[in-house]
Image: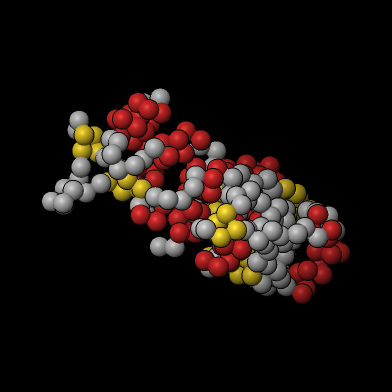
Amino acid sequence: MEIQELISRGRLIFHGAPKRLDVFKIVNGRRSAKDIAKRTGRSLSSALQDLQKMKDMDLIKPRINRGGQVVKKQGSTVFEKIPQLRHVSMTYFEDPIKAKKKFGKRFRKVKKKAKDRQLRVISTPNEKEILEICRTGEDQPYEFKRAGVKTEKLAREVAAFANTKIGGIIFYGIDDDGTISGSDKHRQELDQSLQNSVMNTISPSLTIAIKEKDLLGHRIVLIIVPPWNKKDVYHHNGRVLIRKGTNVFTAKPEESRKLHSGIYVV
């Protein structure tokens, strides 16, 4: 596995969890889970939960002796970082954008252009503009979703839009062919369920706007995703997603590296 992917995984599970990162810092192949819990001031159960999350992300592993047995001390498993991460600075997990070095090479500074600094949330279209969008069809910043689509699928689209330069709008209540069929939920109802799904599946936290519009006698809901801020790389269930055209793709390793360096991909 590429080291950049491992760092991305680390950023995901350590974001907003400094105590978990403290646990990871002192994993060295000699300390048991009990010792780690004692040194970090955490309960054994909390430390074990953190260690299990890191193990599930392939960041650490139980230490194995020459006989192929798991090493334990006082009945507690000894963990070690996987080889690729043993000499990686913790700054990559603490503040990846400000890190000045990357695997022995310096980050190339990305100059902010005036138009990037002035980039704002995509504007909310009026009724006439929405009808024109329905006529021309889905595009890079516009996605149609018929009523009844699960919020988990909507959250996936949100995550992909969030990693793009201009963000986007999901029109809930419009079929794939542009037919205006209407929403089956009021804005408040969709807002609550979608915001919960976004909070549970997307990291770091992301703010979206949800608005309601009346269109030719039908109620539709607009889910407005802000442009990428060139700082946070959004993960959906552990994967970096990008919207290209009208489709959602998992970011390729080189695309993920660009995003983590503050460079637009789309």
**Outermost residue toward the bottom?**
136
Residue 263 image position (x, y, % from top left): 67, 62
**In the figure, 111 relative to 194: above or below?**
below
Is the C terminus in the top left, top right, bottom left or bottom right quadrant? Answer: bottom right
Residue for point 30% across, 43% down: 29
Q: Quadrant of residue 214?
A: bottom right
**In the figure, 49 relative to 8: above or below?**
above
Q: Is residue 170 visible?
A: no
Q: Nearer the viewer, residue 35 or 205?
A: 35
Q: Is residue 165 visible?
A: yes
Residue for point 70% across, 53% down: 229
Q: Nearer the viewer, residue 172 or 65?
A: 65
Q: Nearer the viewer, residue 221 or 160?
A: 160
**Outermost residue toward the left?**
67
Give the colouring mode of the picture.
Answer: secondary structure
**In the figure, 86 relative to 163: above or below?**
above
Q: Nearer the viewer, residue 176 or 15?
A: 15
Q: Quadrant of residue 144?
A: bottom right
Is the N terminus in the top left, top right, bottom left or bottom right quadrant? Answer: bottom left
Residue for point 78% across, 68% down: 133
Q: Is residue 73 left or right of residue 95?
A: left
Residue 219 image position (x, y, % from top left): 74, 54
Q: How many marks?
A: 0
Residue 130 image position (x, y, % from top left): 80, 64
